[in-house]
Amino acid sequence: RFARDAYSILHYPIIVGIVFFAVSAEDVVAHPQTPLSTTVAIAMALGVAMVLVSIVASVYRTVPRVLLLRLATGAVLIALVWLTNGIDALGTAAMVSAVLVAELIWEHTHHWHSAAAEIAESPDK
């Protein structure tokens, strides 16, 4: 059951999120100077948010740990795309990319530093 949940069922929303984002990315590439339609903007925000939330669920299923930063990033991206409705598609995509890069940098720096500290403090080194 564990492998089924973590490596199969919880990957379907990741795939759906990637497809949603791909649809919106195609529109950004085709029409970078025009604002995204509401449907495409929703696809962009939900696509990225679905990937993040599905990864959080998958990690929680394997290691009972909630990655709150990824959940918060998904919520910020949905709000960002909603608030920036009307600006050009390239600007929206740039803002979504900037939020994701900031989240990944923060997570990488803090996760690896805390993981290294836990290993250093481990009694069975």
Image (cartoon, rainbow, N blue to C red):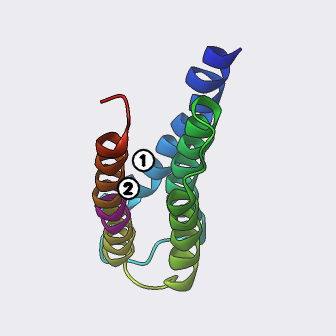
Choose between 125 and 8: the one closer to the eye.
125
| Vertical arrangement, residue 51 with respect to residue 74, above or below | above
Q: CA distance from mark 1 to mark 2?
A: 5 Å
Question: Could you tell me residue 72's position as x and y percent?
Answer: 56, 67
| Vertical arrangement, residue 102 with respect to residue 8, above or below | below
Q: Visible in this render: residue 62?
A: yes
Q: Visible in this render: residue 16?
A: no
In the displayed image of the protein, which residue is found farthest to the right? 1
Quadrant for residue 64, please give it.
top right
Rendered residue at 33%/40% (across/down):
119
In the displayed image of the protein, which residue is found farthest to the front? 123
What label sits on residue 22 in the rendered view? 1
What label sits on residue 25 in the rendered view? 2
Choose between 32 and 85: the one closer to the eye.
85
- Compared across the picture, whether 8 is left or right of 25 comes to right
Quadrant for residue 7, please give it.
top right
Residue type at numbered disc 2 = Ala
Dots 1, 2 in contact, CB < 8 A: yes
Question: Could you tell me residue 17's position as x and y percent?
Answer: 54, 45
Indicate yes or no whether the magenta region holds residue 60: no
Residue type at numbered disc 1 = Ala
Question: Could you tell me residue 88's position as x and y percent?
Answer: 37, 80
Rendered residue at 38%/70% (across/down):
99
Count up the numbered dots: 2
Q: Secondary structure at mark 1?
A: helix
**Magenta-drawn segment:** 102-107
Q: Secondary structure at mark 2?
A: helix
Rendered residue at 30%/70% (across/down):
32
Rendered residue at 32%/68% (across/down):
102
Question: Could you tell me residue 83's position as x and y percent?
Answer: 55, 85
